[in-house]
Amino acid sequence: MGAALAEERLVSVDSHVHFTDEWVKARLRKPMHAVWDEANAKAEVHAAKVLRGGQKQLELEDFVDPEAARDPGHFTPEGKLAAMDRDGVFAEVIFPELAGAKIVNPALMGDDWKEVFRGYNEAMADFASHDPKRLMTAYQLPLYDIDFAVEEVERLARDKQARCVQLTPFPADLGLPDVYHERYEPLWKIIEETGLTVLNHLDLKKELWDVFRRDPTPQKGIFTGLAWAPLAEAICMWILTGTLEKYPKMKVLFVEPGLGWLPWFFQALLDPRMHQHYEFPGVKRPPSETFKAQCGATFMYEPQGLKACYDYFGPDCLYWSTDFPHPATCWPNSRSQVVSQFAEAGIPQADRVKITSGNAMRTFGLG
């Protein structure tokens, strides 16, 4: 298995990079520098007073691997490519450590937000331009203004070789309708037409900050262990509202959800409801079939969960990742961990190749 793996092109569908303030501001007009800085300051005040309730922020060491976080691959495109080469990884989907939409919005920037948002995506595009095939930046899309979001999809697909876009999994936290609402129809249509993949990355739902404030443990271990659970809501909103069936060419990947709960969730809760007294207008097939056809989930090291998902869904909707530079990362030992994890899960080589390479190569057009 090890010899065969050496010839395979591993693709990580979840990796991170830290775009510094300087990197972003270099892509903005000078008058927008102050807008960026002021929005960051306002966001931190809100986080400290409202979200954390006056409690201290977690230390960097609590949510990154120290070696990986200090590596140039966390900061620069040249460093990222070198870190990938060291790890034996061909390509990565790259998420910013801080999502632009967290700061670049009308509430914090007023009428300047669109210009800054486009500049933020330019910062991501410049990073990817060093090797657009290997560095697949997860471009941000705002949901505040659908016409603007449509323009961004068209621009990114046309000019930036975009392969994927990141959307919040929780529009309601922004005071917006959920994904089934008619206001999103132009956006879902253009995403479907351009063939871009939608990414719903693990995120902190607003209500989870109440757990942070109540969590008495030193590193907020209760709070940090619960972020996966709200993604169940996002999955239901995409599937049980009939939204994905309405746009059959659309693909949504759930990034960093954890795998072990997914077979139980579909087998015990979602699929049976199609045969009970619940009504789901627009839903014509079992939810698990939609998940297999139009969705997917990423994972790091989770051999038991991987085995459970593989047995229930099959190999075609599972996507391997390094999660560089976070604590669960397998960097710089990804190849050896791939061998050990898939052997432990009892998954044959052909399907291991699909999960660590083939699925992503197909989904993101890397062939």
Image (cartoon, rainbow, N blue to C red):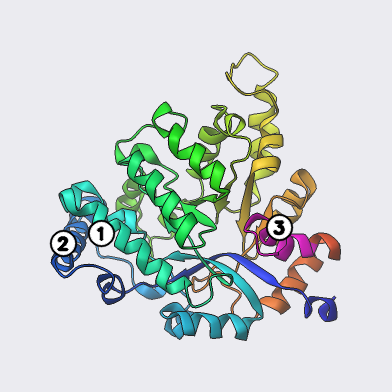
Q: Nearer the viewer, mark 3 or mark 1?
A: 1
Mark 3 vs mark 1, CA separation in Å: 34 Å
Residue furthest front as drawn: 158
Pointers 2 and 1 in contact (C-beta within 8 Å): yes
Residue furthest top as drawn: 277
**Label 1, on which residue?**
116
Q: Earlier in the sequence, mark 3 or mark 1?
A: 1
What residue range appears in magenta? 352-367
| Residue 332 appears in the rendering | no
Mark 2 vs mark 1, CA separation in Å: 8 Å
**Label 3, on which residue?**
359
Q: Is residue 246 magenta?
A: no
Q: Secondary structure at mark 2?
A: helix
Q: Nearer the viewer, mark 2 or mark 1?
A: 1
Residue in front for this viewpoint, 321 or 105? 105
Numbered badge on residue 35? 2
| Residue 223 appears in the rendering | yes
Residue drawn at 44 percent across, 50 percent down: 153
Q: Earlier in the sequence, mark 2 or mark 1?
A: 2
Residue drawn at 24 percent across, 67 percent down: 28
Q: Secondary structure at mark 3?
A: helix
